[in-house]
Amino acid sequence: MIIAVDGPLASGKGTIARALSERFSLPHLDTGTLYRATGLAVLDAGADPSNAQACADLARNLDLDAIDETRIRTAEAGAMASKVAAIPQVREALFALQRAFATQPGGAILDGRDIGTVICPDAEVKLFVTADAETRARRRWEELTAKGERLSFEDMLAQTHERDRRDAGRPDAPMRPADDATLLDTSSLSIDAAVATAIRIVEKRQKA
Ligand code: C5P
């Protein structure tokens, strides 16, 4: 079984995907990590983020074992990830890896922006997890400031809108729910309630 979990920043998709991975014993890939690592590689190399070829080369040569888990979670890495993610050659460079993960025997769970639409249009279960922008900005702001990052809530909200606009507005693989995705709005749900709802959706699909 392939489960695709898509949605915008801090919608809860990562938490839900991890919980589903545990519940259904399926390996999980957070595909945002690949774009974040590419964004950091661009920053570290001092490369021009508008140079498609240079960014794609860095994406192709990512060393996934050397990913710095702390640095890729920063707001800076997220913002650069969303810039390089708009480059078709970067997406193409990361396609085969994601597809190979998805099609491993026994199935997999992937979360991202284009899993249900581009990477796994054949997924048995597709979830599109959303929440209103204020709620998402507050969640991410609390997460980042707890880790010591200094940014105001207003800046976080502006970054959230900016990221939504860029991810949904790009011509190549824009963030959007697949036609056959189930929408899950987590704005007023606790983590436990959101996870329980997602589990029910998967179980219902399994029975069908
Ligand atoms: O999910 P996360 O916030 O870690 O993703 C960082 C950025 O990577 C997103 O804003 C988006 O631009 C990009 N991304 C993408 N497609 C995916 C996963 C992430 O374009 N499947």
Image: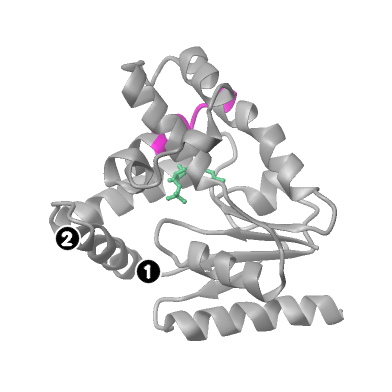
Q: Residues within 10 Å of mark 1 (few under 14, many from 20)?
A: some
Bounds of the magenta segment: 81-89
Residue 22 appears left or right of 39: right
Q: Quadrant of the N terminus?
A: bottom right
Residue 2 position, x and y percent, is 76, 59
Q: Earlier in the sequence, mark 2 or mark 1?
A: 1
In the depicted view, which residue is nearer to us: 90 or 61? 61
Residue 152 appears left or right of 77: left
Amino acid beneath label 2 = Phe
| Residue 153: assigned label | 2
Amino acid beneath label 1 = Asp
Residue 159 position, x and y percent, is 27, 49
Which residue occupies 42% across, 70% down?
Answer: 131
Vertical side of 126 occupied by 159: above or below: above
- Residue corresponding to mark 1: 132
Vertical side of 175 occupied by 56: above or below: above
Which residue occupies 28% across, 63% down?
Answer: 143
In the depicted view, which residue is nearer to us: 105 or 59? 105
Label 1: state its secondary structure: loop
